[in-house]
Image: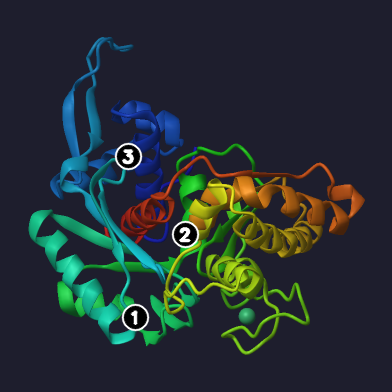
C-alpha cells in the first residue's frame, strides 16, 4: 500500500483518485482505496477536501455493503467541471466544451484567421464560451514549436505566430489556467487517456496543411530534448522538391500535405484553383471521387512521398501501428495505393508487418485531447494547494 505524504505526493494521489473515478464510475471511499492502493486515511483526506471544493459529490449509497453499513458513493461533479478544448489549425479551428469525461457539450468549427487577427479570434471565441459555461480551464492545441511547460507557442509558421505566451495571456484575460501543446501530441494523448487503443507503441500522423506525428513509446509520449520531436513534416523526402516555409527544400509537408495535393493538381492539370494558397485538398478529393484522373494523380504523387516519410519514421521507431489522421485522411482511398507501394520499397524488412490505418476517431480528436489534457493538468496542478 502506498504511504501518504501530505506534500509531494498529494497532487498525484488526487490525480489517481480522479483517474479511477473516471474509468470506474461512482465508488465508495473504501473502493477507491482498494482500486488506487492508497491508504484509506489518504483517500478520506483528499476526497473530503475535494467535496468541500465541490469537485467531487456524494451520489447515494452502494446497493450491497460488504461490512454491514452501506458506503456512500462518490463521483466527479462533471456538470460543474467543464474545460475548453481549442484546436487552432492553420485552415480551420475548433472549439469544444467537454466535461472531462469526454462528453462534448458545445462544438464550433470555423475558418482560422492569421497572426494578430487569429489572436483576436481566439479571445472572442473563449469569451463567448465562458459566458455560457462555467469553465474551469483551457486546453489549447497549436501547430508548430511549442513549450508546454511555459505554455507558449514559440514559433508556428503555419499560423504565422511567434512567442505567444498563451498561459500568461489566458490568466490575465480570463483568469483561467491554460495548458498548451502541439496538436499531434494532443491527438496522441486523447488515444492514451481514453484507453481506446491497446498498443503501447504507436504513431499518429496528422496530415492537414502541415504534417506532424505524435509518437507513443511504451505508453508514453516521446517529446525529445526540447519538445521538438515529431516534426515529420520537415523530414526531407525529395531533395529536388519544392521550397518549404521552414527554409529547406522537399520536406514531406511540401510534397504530401493538403496544400501540396492542391499544388500537385494545379501543376498536373494546368488549372488554377484560385484559392490563394488557402484552399484544402477537399476540392481535389471531390474531383477524384468523380473519376478525374488528374486529381487522382495529385493524390498518388503525394502518397509516393508520404510512403517514404512513414518508412523513415517506422525504421527508426518500430511502432506496432501507424495511424493516419487529419483532413487529408478523408482522401486515404486515393493515397493508400501509392503510399503503401513506396512504403514497401523503403521499409527495412524487420518492420514489414507494421500496419498503417486511418484513425477511427474523427475530427474532434485534437480538441478533445486538449480538453482532456486541461482536465488532467488541472487535477494535478491546481486542485490541492
Ligand atoms: Zn520544412
Task: Indicate the position of residue 148 as horizontal and vertical percent values.
Answer: 44, 72
Q: Which residue is mark 1?
A: 114
Classify 10 Å Cα crowding around label 3: few (below 14), some (14-19), many (20 and above): many
Give the answer, above or below, for where 20 lies relative to 233.
above
Residue 118 or residue 47, whichever sits in front: 118
Residue in the picture at 25% in, 11% down: 63
Q: Which residue is drawn at the image coordinates 22% and 79% (left, top)? A: 120
Residue 117, position in %: x, y? 26, 82
Image position of 195 with respect to 28: above or below: below
- The C terminus lies in which quarter of the figure? bottom left
Colour basis: rainbow
The CA span between labels 1 and 3 is: 47 Å
Which comes before the other along the chain, label 1 or label 2? 1
Q: Is residue 21 above or below residue 296?
A: above
Q: Secondary structure at mark 2?
A: helix
How many numbered circles does the render carry? 3
Numbered tag placed on residue 43 in the rendering = 3
- Helix, strand or loop at disc 1? loop
The residue beneath circle 2 is: 283
Could you say which quadrant of the image residue 362 lies in? top left
Q: Is residue 314 left or right of residue 350?
A: left
On whether ligand 1 comes within 8 Å of the CB at mark 2, the answer is: no
Q: Nearer the viewer, residue 5 or 95?
A: 95
Q: Nearer the viewer, residue 133 or 358?
A: 358
Q: Residue at x 47, y 76 (%)?
A: 146
Tag on residue 21?
A: none
Amino acid at each position: 500500500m502506498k504511504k501518504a505524504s501530505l506534500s509531494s505526493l498529494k497532487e498525484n494521489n488526487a490525480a489517481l483518485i480522479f483517474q479511477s473515478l473516471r474509468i470506474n464510475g461512482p465508488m465508495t471511499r473504501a473502493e477507491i482505496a482498494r482500486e488506487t492502493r492508497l491508504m484509506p486515511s489518504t483517500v478520506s483526506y483528499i476526497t473530503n477536501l475535494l467535496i468541500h471544493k465541490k469537485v467531487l459529490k456524494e451520489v447515494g449509497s452502494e446497493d450491497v455493503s460488504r461490512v454491514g453499513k452501506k458506503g456512500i458513493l462518490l463521483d466527479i461533479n462533471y456538470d460543474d467541471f467543464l474545460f475548453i478544448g481549442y484546436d487552432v489549425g492553420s485552415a480551420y479551428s475548433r472549439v469544444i466544451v467537454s466535461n472531462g469525461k469526454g462528453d462534448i457539450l458545445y462544438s464550433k468549427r470555423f475558418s482560422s484567421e492569421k497572426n494578430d487577427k487569429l489572436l483576436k479570434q481566439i479571445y472572442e471565441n473563449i469569451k463567448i464560451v465562458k459566458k455560457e459555461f462555467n469553465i474551469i480551464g483551457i486546453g489549447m492545441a497549436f501547430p508548430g514549436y511549442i513549450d508546454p511547460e511555459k505554455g507558449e507557442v514559440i514559433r508556428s509558421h503555419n499560423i504565422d505566430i511567434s512567442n505567444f505566451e498563451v498561459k500568461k495571456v489566458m490568466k490575465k484575460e480570463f483568469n483561467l489556467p491554460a495548458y498548451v501543446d502541439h496538436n499531434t501530441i494532443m491527438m496522441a494523448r486523447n488515444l492514451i487517456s481514453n484507453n481506446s487503443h491497446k498498443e503501447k507503441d504507436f504513431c499518429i500522423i496528422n496530415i492537414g496543411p502541415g504534417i506532424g506525428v505524435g509518437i507513443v513509446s511504451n505508453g508514453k509520449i516521446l517529446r525529445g530534448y526540447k519538445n521538438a520531436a515529431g516534426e515529420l513534416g520537415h523530414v526531407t523526402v525529395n531533395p529536388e522538391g519544392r521550397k518549404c516555409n521552414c527554409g529547406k527544400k522537399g520536406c514531406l509537408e511540401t510534397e504530401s500535405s493538403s496544400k501540396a495535393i492542391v499544388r500537385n493538381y494545379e501543376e498536373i492539370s494546368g488549372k488554377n484553383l484560385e484559392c490563394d494558397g488557402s484552399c484544402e485538398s477537399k476540392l481535389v478529393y471531390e474531383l477524384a471521387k468523380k473519376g478525374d484522373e488528374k486529381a487522382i494523380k495529385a493524390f498518388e504523387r503525394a502518397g509516393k512521398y508520404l510512403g517514404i516519410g512513414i518508412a523513415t519514421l517506422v525504421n527508426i521507431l518500430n511502432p506496432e501501428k501507424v495511424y493516419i489522421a487529419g483532413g487529408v485522411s478523408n482522401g486515404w482511398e486515393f493515397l493508400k495505393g501509392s503510399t503503401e507501394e513506396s512504403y514497401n520499397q523503403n521499409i527495412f524488412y524487420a518492420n514489414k508487418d507494421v500496419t498503417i490505418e486511418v484513425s477511427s476517431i474523427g475530427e474532434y480528436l485534437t480538441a478533445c485531447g486538449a480538453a482532456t489534457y486541461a482536465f488532467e493538468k488541472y487535477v494535478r496542478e491546481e486542485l490541492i494547494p
